């Protein structure tokens, strides 16, 4: 009588190593999206009763990239990507401050450009503080939830990880960001703030949910193309 040995199970989830061109591209993309979102967020936008900011269509992409990094490379890699985004935003704010402080032309055209720069880029520091407070807390929460869920389910349950982590991360992010950034974009009443928080969370969450099938495909292909991830899968 023959017996079949049980299939060995992994003691820890599989992750790829960070030393690849794919990881660099993902981190660079996240940093660019964060910087552009911060600039766009300095403009208040209103669609009827919906109050939002000019970066509303970009910011969900940062979380999608964060999901990909968290799932394929792990929590530490996601934390590093978040810090790179923070550094890029800080550099952008410092650059804007220097540009505005530099002496410009004193003719009418030069003065008009100076005023436009001050109005458009002057409040960005407050937006960046709001964005990074929310993004760091939200993105790290998002990555932590994904890593904890993956530790339990291994390669199964990717959709549940994507959706569950999104809800937690976006809630934390949106509340912090909207509270700190409100005055910078002209929000002065509690009703405007509540609308800003509710519709901001709803929009970003629905966008990420809608793009889950695409995110799943991207993650699947990236796992196949990362040799270190395939090697980690073979380890028991």
Image (tube, rainbow, N blue to C red):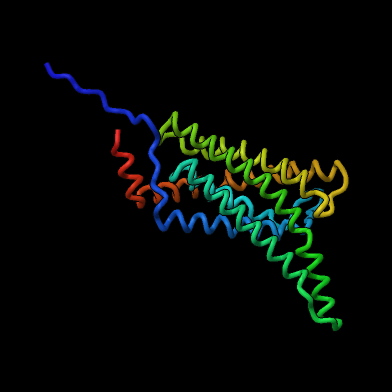
Question: Which quadrant is the C terminus positioned in?
Answer: top left
Q: Which residue is most to the bottom?
A: 107
Give residue 39's position: percent from left, percent from top: 70, 60
Horizontally, residue 106 falls left or right of residue 173, namely right
Q: Is residue 227 above or below residue 91?
A: above
Of 32 and 64, nearer the camera is 32
Question: Which quadrant is the N terminus positioned in?
Answer: top left
Q: In this view, does 41 lie above or below 75?
A: below
Number of numbered markers: 0
Horizontally, residue 204 falls left or right of residue 107, namely left
Q: In this view, does 111 lie above or below 193?
A: below
Residue shown at the point (29%, 39%) measured from the top left: 234
Residue shown at the point (49%, 41%) measured from the top left: 75
Residue shown at the point (59%, 54%) measured from the top left: 85
Give residue 42's position: percent from left, percent from top: 76, 58
Quadrant position of residue 150:
top left
Give residue 104's position: percent from left, percent from top: 79, 78
Of 154 and 198, nearer the camera is 154
Q: Which residue is most to the left?
A: 1
Horizontally, residue 85 falls left or right of residue 178, namely left
């Amino acid at each position: 009588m023959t017996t079949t040995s049980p299939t060995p199970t992994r003691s820890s989830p599989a992750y790829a190593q960070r030393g690849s061109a794919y990881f660099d591209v993902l981190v660079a993309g996240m940093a660019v999206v964060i910087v552009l979102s911060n600039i766009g967020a300095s403009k208040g936008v209103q669609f009827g009763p919906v109050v939002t900011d000019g970066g509303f269509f970009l910011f969900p992409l940062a979380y999608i990239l964060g999901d990909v990094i968290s799932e394929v490379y792990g929590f530490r890699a996601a934390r590093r990507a978040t810090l790179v985004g923070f550094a890029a935003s800080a550099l952008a704010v410092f650059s804007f401050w220097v540009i505005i402080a530099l002496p410009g032309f004193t003719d009418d055209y030069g003065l008009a450009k100076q005023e436009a720069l001050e109005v458009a880029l002057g409040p960005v520091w407050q937006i960046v503080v709001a964005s990074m407070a929310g993004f760091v807390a939200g993105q790290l929460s998002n990555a932590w939830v994904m890593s904890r869920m993956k530790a339990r389910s291994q390669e199964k349950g990717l959709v549940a990880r994507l959706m569950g982590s999104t809800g937690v991360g976006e809630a934390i992010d949106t509340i912090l960001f909207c509270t700190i950034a409100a005055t910078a974009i002209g929000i002065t009443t509690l009703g405007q703030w509540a609308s800003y928080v509710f519709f901001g969370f709803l929009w970003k969450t629905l966008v990420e949910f809608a793009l889950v099938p695409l995110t799943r495909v991207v993650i699947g292909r990236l796992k196949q193309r990362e040799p270190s991830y395939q090697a980690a899968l073979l380890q028991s």
